[in-house]
Image (cartoon, helix red, strand yellow):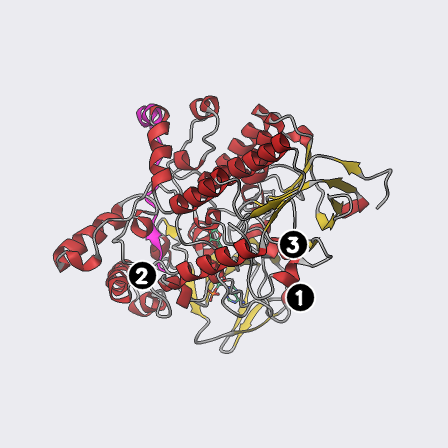
Amino acid sequence: MDAVSTHQYEVIIIGAGISGMYQLHCLRELGMNVRVFETADDVGGTWYWNRYPGARFDSESYSYGYSFSEELLQEWEWEEHFSAQPETLRYLNHVADKFDLRKHIEFQTRIESARYDKTKNLWHVSCSQGRTACAPFLITALGPISVPTLPNITGLDSFRGEAYHTGLWPHEPIDFRDKRVAVIGTGATGVQVIQEVAKSAGHLSVFQRSPNYCAPLVNSPIDPQTQQEIKKSYTDIFKRCAETHGAFLHKADSRSTFDVTAEEREAFYEKLYGQPGFGIWMGNFRDVLVDQQANDTMNDFMARKVRERVDDPAVAEMLIPTDHGFGTRRIPMETNYYEVYNQDNVRLIDLNSEAIEEITTKGIVTEANEYEFDMIIYATGFDAVTGAFDKIDIRGEDGQKLKDKWTDGPKTYLGLQSAGFPNMLTLVGPHNAATFCNIPRCIEQNVDWVTDLVSYMRDKKWVKVEATQAAEEEWTAHVLTTAEKMLFSKVDSWFMGMNKNLAHKQKRRFLLYAGGAPAYRDKCNDIAADHYRGFAFQ
Ligand code: NA7
């Protein structure tokens, strides 16, 4: 490293999304010299990149914003119960301005490697454009869903029309009118983009490999009176979030599925189906995500809903999942999604009966047909949770590569540190409750905890913190045991680290933490109170 050009800071943060921004704010409040490096040319992370039409929250807007500033809470007025991406990005820009964050952030700077120098107790990072920097602390704020993956289909680059991945959507408006548009992918993103593009596309073809159980979002504008009530209720809103498993406003019903009669169950499911947000997933019977028989009652209910809403019975059957149960994969939230398939300008192509063979200059060739398009939209997902770590050449104490250490699945303590990587703290890292959470709520917990740790070390004049091997093994085992109880552990999804487009991600390896946000928070607090049990300091 060049000693002249390598600037030294006290903390380097990678990423200026929701977690990086708040971490910067907190450490600056401690008076620390912090530098944030960000690939994009502005703040926002997920909400900077995912500009595709239809992108919006599945969390109630007022449960999603930062809670740390009463002034911010009182001055910001969410327009809708489930905010759309442009408003969310405006909000994050407002936060960056209000707390004067940008002057500490270097934009358009991608960190390519991070190496720990044990002789000097420094993390050295090198960025695109040859920029280098170092600091004793490295905090990753990479985002769990930030590395888009394209499908592994032959001829991808040969298509001569417009082609976009939803996670790398252009900044300028895209016009779908009179165009023949293809969407590949029917996850949470695909569902949002399909229902929006269908409104104006000349013709839309949806290429579906696996249908998902989708539930109504039931969004609406926030009227002035409700706005005032929300502003008065923030304490209660965040208290409620703090009590629920996923830090959403929705709490699991204390009853078991078979505690009630079939009629009562049906009425309860109808009520959930008509309610806004994730209540149907997070506020359902307590055993619906763990007991197969209970889960089947929801599967039957959801299948009936699809059949009621889709006119063509053959299309309806194509839209009903057969390979997984309700809630075992991420539930896409929809607004008239199923009705899209009743429109004359929309067709659904089932890739299980005609697999894609190649993409050509003109469009998509399947085993059965050749389709011509003006535009292909890839809603094909992300290299979730560990993908952003894999993209950086991160090397720890003895030159060990983090990517190699995590080949068979992540190994962490609390999802916040990995043994052998001292002073590197991973916000929303793998096996951290924040990965399975109304994310800003858990991000604030992660950041507050890390800030306290750094502050504690300063007080003690300690310079190095590292998770012990034993603590890491215990946490990793706990994470995996907890996941085994859940039905989703038997299903392929990004929760389970499966990505059919990546050759090295063909084995299930659980990436999240399923023990719930309250239990996780208690554990973190308990460890901190016990002098950071499981961490070794120097
Ligand atoms: P997801 O949930 O990973 O969905 C990706 C979709 O793309 C899914 O339907 C995939 O089908 C499909 N896909 C991926 N590759 C292919 C190929 N090669 N051919 C056909 N279809 C393909 O990503 P999202 O962006 O929707 O959502 C990610 C998260 O972001 C979401 O959960 C929210 O938390 C925010 P498959 O199911 O693999 O058969």
Q: Please tell me which of labels 2 and 1 falls first in the chain.
A: 1
Rendered location of residue 373, percent (x, y): 55, 62
- Amino acid found under the numbered disc labelled 2: Val
Of helix, strand and loop, which one carries label 1?
A: helix
- Amino acid found under the numbered disc labelled 1: Ser
Of helix, strand and loop, which one carries label 2?
A: loop
Q: Residue at x 70, y 59 (%)?
A: 400
Q: Which residue is mark 3?
A: 420
- Residue 163 seen anywhere in this rendered image of the structure: no
Does 390 sit above or below residue 60? below
Q: Which residue is mark 1?
A: 158
Rendered location of residue 211, percent (x, y): 40, 64
Rendered location of residue 225, percent (x, y): 31, 24
Q: Residue at x 43, y 46 (%)?
A: 520
Q: Which residue is mark 2?
A: 290
Does 536 sit above or below residue 64? below
Q: Residue at x 40, y 64 (%)?
A: 484
- Amino acid found under the numbered disc labelled 3: Gly
